[in-house]
Image (cartoon, grey):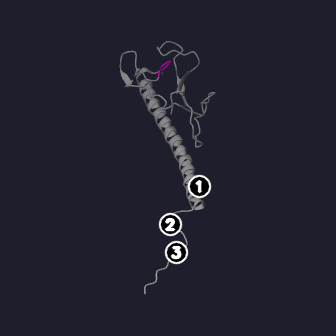
Amino acid sequence: MLLTTVSLMPNNEGFTLIELLVVITIIAVLSVIGMVAYSGFLKNSRDAKRQSDLRIIQSALEDYHSDQIYYPASIQQGTSLTSPNGRIYLNQIPKDLKSDQSYSYTPSPLGCSGTGTSPTCTSYCLYAKFEGSNVPPSDQGCSASGYNFGITRP
């Protein structure tokens, strides 16, 4: 005679509601931490690009000054930096990565001209607005409202 046992207990395969909620909560917390860290990384990388852009513009301005003995009275982002005789110092002046921000160029003394007439532009400040918390110190004498980083001639 063969005896078979019949289980009156249901087959409990799968996850309980509590287990699923715990796993979903852990995944959500890890996702938020990852997104915050990634956001900070993006801000810092855009700031590094801004600092690099200003150094490129600064180098082109110094080349311009060594040839012309003065700095230009103005520069426009997205255009080239050329001398009055047509020499190109920078093919395209970089633009800020964010469309609602821009770099600023302020020659000095106030009201100077870039044509070699008196008074000529003898110095300048380049400005950018950094997003991150690690903003390097600005060069002495370079501060402007709305910008938190500025450099001047070396």
Residue corresponding to mark 3 = 7
Q: Secondary structure at mark 3?
A: loop
Q: Is residue 119 above or below residue 29?
A: above
Q: Is residue 10 above or below residue 70?
A: below
Give how far across and how far down residue 67 sits, in percent: 40, 23
Number of numbered discs visible in the structure rendering:
3
| Amino acid type of the residue that numbered disc 2 sits on in the rendered structure | Glu
- The reply, left or right, for residue 36 in relation to residue 52 is right
Residue at point 45% right, 29% down?
A: 57
N-terminal of the two: label 2 or label 3? 3
Examine the residues drawn in magenta and state their main secondary structure: loop
Q: Is residue 138 above or below residue 114?
A: below
Marks 2, 3: nearer the viewer:
3
Q: Secondary structure at mark 2?
A: loop
Whole-angstrom CA distance, mark 1 to mark 2, is 22 Å
Between 69 and 9, the one nearer to me in the picture: 9
Residue at point 40% right, 25% down?
A: 92
The magenta span reads: 72-76
| Amino acid type of the residue that numbered disc 1 sits on in the rendered structure | Thr
N-terminal of the two: label 1 or label 2? 2
Residue corresponding to mark 2 = 13
| Amino acid type of the residue that numbered disc 3 sits on in the rendered structure | Ser
